[in-house]
Amino acid sequence: MAVPFMPGGYSALALICLASFGIATCAATWIGAVTDVFPQEIVARVTGIAGMGEGVTNMILTLATGRVIDAHSYLPVFLVAGLLPCLGVGSFFAFVRPPISAPASTQFSRPGRRTPTRS
């Protein structure tokens, strides 16, 4: 969000590189989060729907970015681009519920061994 306010091109480029690095590391985290949140049977389906949504969103935002830059400047584009990851994290925590724990009788103490249950 601070890119339009930088005094020179090199400092703006450095901030863009830093933001790109953050986005790349978050992408791997989100892919891992899908496997943690959804059952194994539907992970591929959820990943496919998310990829399709990402592609459609990128097409729309590319056109919208050009129109905003033509009409105004880069400032609104960088401000929105800086706020979108915050919106994504907020919606993730708002819509994902805590995991349901398994009953104590089905939990394992070590792989292959059942925990003794009291009768």
Image: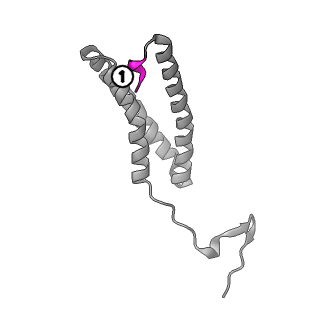
Dot 1 alpha-carbon crowd within 10 angstroms: few under 14, some 14 to 19, many 20 or more = few
Q: Compared with residue 48, is residue 110 higher up or lower down, i.e. above or below?
A: below
Q: Compared with residue 102, is residue 51 higher up or lower down, i.e. above or below?
A: above
Residue 116 coordinates in the image, percent (x, y): 72, 79
Q: Residue furthest top?
A: 9
* Corner quadrant of residue 50: top left
What SS does tag 1 mark?
helix
Looking at the picture, which amino acid does disc 1 mark? Answer: Thr
> Who is closer to the viewer here, 99 or 41?
99
Q: Residue at x 48, y 46 (%)?
A: 45
Q: In this rendering, would 115 be left or right of 100?
A: right
* Corner quadrant of residue 66: top left
Give the residue pinned by disc 1: 62
Residue 16 coordinates in the image, percent (x, y): 48, 21
Quadrant where the N terminus sits is top left
Q: Which residue is drawn at 47% across and 46% down?
A: 46
* Corner quadrant of residue 70: top left
> Who is closer to the viewer here, 10 or 67?
10
Q: Residue at x 68, y 85 (%)?
A: 118
Q: What stretch is highlighted in magenta?
A: 1-6
Q: Residue at x 45, y 11 (%)?
A: 8
> Who is closer to the viewer here, 75 or 114?
75
- Residue 56 visible to an observer of this rendering: no
> Who is closer to the viewer here, 65 or 56?
65
